[in-house]
Image (cartoon, rainbow, N blue to C red):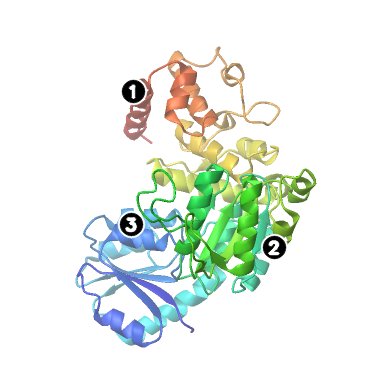
């Protein structure tokens, strides 16, 4: 049966419950929390194989609990209660609970549950990989996932290359969650988001008084990730001078805080990602060749979405379900015409672009089925970039034109309301009021 990672959610704030004692004494890794939101936060880490939860949670309804888990995980959930009505049991299982038992649960039954859910977890690897939505039936991706599991326990550095939006961070988390470091921190830092001086402090930490504004000593990401995994996202954007310091850390396995005088030993598994061709960046003098070879011990290349079109229907189905939950919608699917349109696109933004389009379509469609027009894609099968190409003035009302203009502006600005309001020539307050108006209208629409 093997050792399992089990989360217990019980209302009584007692860390030594009978179930906790039994599972711990059986050799399993067990953690107990007392609220639903704490359980959801734990589950989102991808660390757990199984959840035993009280049916009556103090901070949320059981249906809300199940729906929020489904966004990021397919983990089996077993509900427990001292007393319950049959209709509630049926409803919970109907909405995704694995099983329902009256407390206290017999230890023999617990062992059977663990055995059965272990088999389900092994069989159910297509849609969720250890709690992460790596959705595929593409042979190249499946081979990458197999290789990633094989090297997960290694200390070797990993370099993941691929276009923006292909899922590089997901693969990094997949490696961590399948490694012997899974119960230790996974820390990520975007090297493109911070200037050189600030990035150095974020990576290595600083001593109090080491520079203006350093009011207290601060640990860097390397120290925070000790015994765990550090993801260096978009490593190609790191300043050249800082690359030499990173190289030394990898070689010596120790860091020195900004303003510090003594080295600090760290045990960190490094995973780096980039959307650039690092060999070309080396030729241009933008990236150190010696650092490249240190990072590229285990290389992975994630193919773009246009090379794995067989995954588009799976991804679309997942994103529709996700945004149905988040936006309180009830979209069942999309027309054949809409799917064919998606299958023929170039997908310069890859999976991230697909998700944005489906999120918008779930909000825009006026029924339970997404039509080709709801996708806002032009005849050349590219996302529309000019307002004039997305509006057919002969068929749309002024209200609908306004609505599409707002969502288009939000899409162009990656959801930044301030920038979207500037494009539209309206105030942020007006934009917020319009979005609330659309939300209220959708909630009132009969289906």
Quarter assignment of residue 354: top right
**Residue 384 appears at what percent x and percent y?**
62, 26
**Residue 262 appears at what percent x and percent y?**
49, 66
The reply to whether discs 2 and 1 touch (Cβ–Cβ < 8 Å) is no
Rendered residue at 46%/31% (across/down): 416
Res. 120 mark: none
Q: Nearer the viewer, residue 261 or 255?
A: 261
Quarter assignment of residue 45: bottom left
Rendered residue at 29%/65% (across/down): 89
Which tag, 3 or 1, sits closer to the chain's start? 3
Which tag, 3 or 2, sits closer to the chain's start? 3
Q: Nearer the viewer, residue 370 or 345?
A: 345
Rendered residue at 51%/55% (across/down): 203
Label 2 vs label 1, nearer the camera: 2
Res. 429 mark: 1
Question: In the shown orientation, is residue 165 left or right of residue 322?
Answer: right
Res. 294 mark: 2
Dot 1: element: helix
Dot 2: element: helix
Which tag, 2 or 1, sits closer to the chain's start? 2
CA gap between label 2 and label 1 equals: 50 Å
Label 3 vs label 1, nearer the camera: 1
Up-down relation of residue 139 to residue 16 (above or below): above
Dot 3: element: helix
CA gap between label 3 and label 2 equals: 43 Å
> Badge 3 is on which residue?
65
């Amino acid at each position: 049966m093997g050792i399992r990672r089990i989360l217990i959610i019980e209302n009584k704030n007692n860390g030594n419950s009978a179930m906790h004692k039994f599972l711990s004494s059986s050799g399993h890794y067990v953690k107990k929390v007392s609220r639903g939101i704490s359980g959801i936060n734990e589950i989102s880490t991808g660390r757990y194989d199984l959840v035993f939860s009280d049916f009556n949670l103090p901070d949320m309804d059981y249906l809300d609990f199940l729906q929020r888990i489904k966004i990021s995980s397919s983990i089996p959930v077993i509900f427990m209660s001292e007393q319950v009505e049959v209709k509630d049991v049926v409803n919970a299982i109907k909405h995704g609970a694995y099983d329902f038992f009256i407390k206290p649960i017999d230890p023999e039954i617990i062992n059977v549950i663990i055995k059965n859910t272990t088999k389900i977890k092994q069989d159910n690897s297509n849609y969720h990989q250890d709690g992460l939505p790596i959705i595929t039936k593409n042979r190249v991706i499946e081979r990458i996932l197999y290789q990633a599991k094989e090297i997960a326990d290694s200390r070797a550095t990993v370099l993941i290359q691929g276009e923006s939006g292909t899922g590089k961070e997901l693969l990094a988390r997949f490696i961590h969650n399948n490694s012997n470091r899974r119960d230790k921190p996974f820390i990520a830092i975007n090297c493109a988001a911070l200037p050189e001086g600030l990035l150095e402090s974020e990576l290595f930490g600083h001593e109090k008084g080491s520079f203006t504004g350093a009011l207290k000593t601060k640990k860097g990401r390397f120290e925070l990730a000790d015994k765990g995994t550090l993801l260096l996202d978009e490593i190609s954007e790191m300043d050249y001078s800082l690359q030499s310091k990173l190289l030394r850390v990898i070689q010596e396995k120790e860091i020195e805080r900004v303003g510090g005088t003594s080295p600090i030993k760290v045990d960190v598994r490094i995973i780096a990602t980039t959307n650039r061709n690092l060999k070309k960046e080396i030729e241009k003098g933008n990236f150190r060749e010696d650092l490249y070879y240190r990072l590229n011990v285990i290389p992975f290349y994630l193919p773009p979405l246009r090379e794995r079109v067989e995954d588009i229907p799976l991804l679309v189905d997942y994103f529709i379900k996700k945004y149905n939950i988040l936006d309180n919608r009830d979209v069942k699917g999309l027309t054949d015409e809409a799917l064919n349109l998606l299958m023929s696109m170039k997908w310069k933004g890859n999976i991230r672009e697909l998700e944005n389009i489906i999120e918008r379509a779930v909000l825009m469609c006026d029924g339970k089925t997404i039509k080709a027009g709801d996708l806002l894609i032009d005849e050349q099968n590219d996302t529309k970039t000019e307002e004039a190409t997305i509006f057919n003035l002969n068929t749309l009302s002024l209200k609908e034109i306004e609505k599409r203009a707002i969502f288009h502006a939000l899409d162009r600005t990656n959801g930044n309301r301030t920038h979207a309001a500037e494009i539209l020539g309206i105030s942020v307050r007006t934009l917020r009021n319009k979005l609330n108006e659309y939300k209220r209208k959708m909630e009132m629409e009969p289906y």
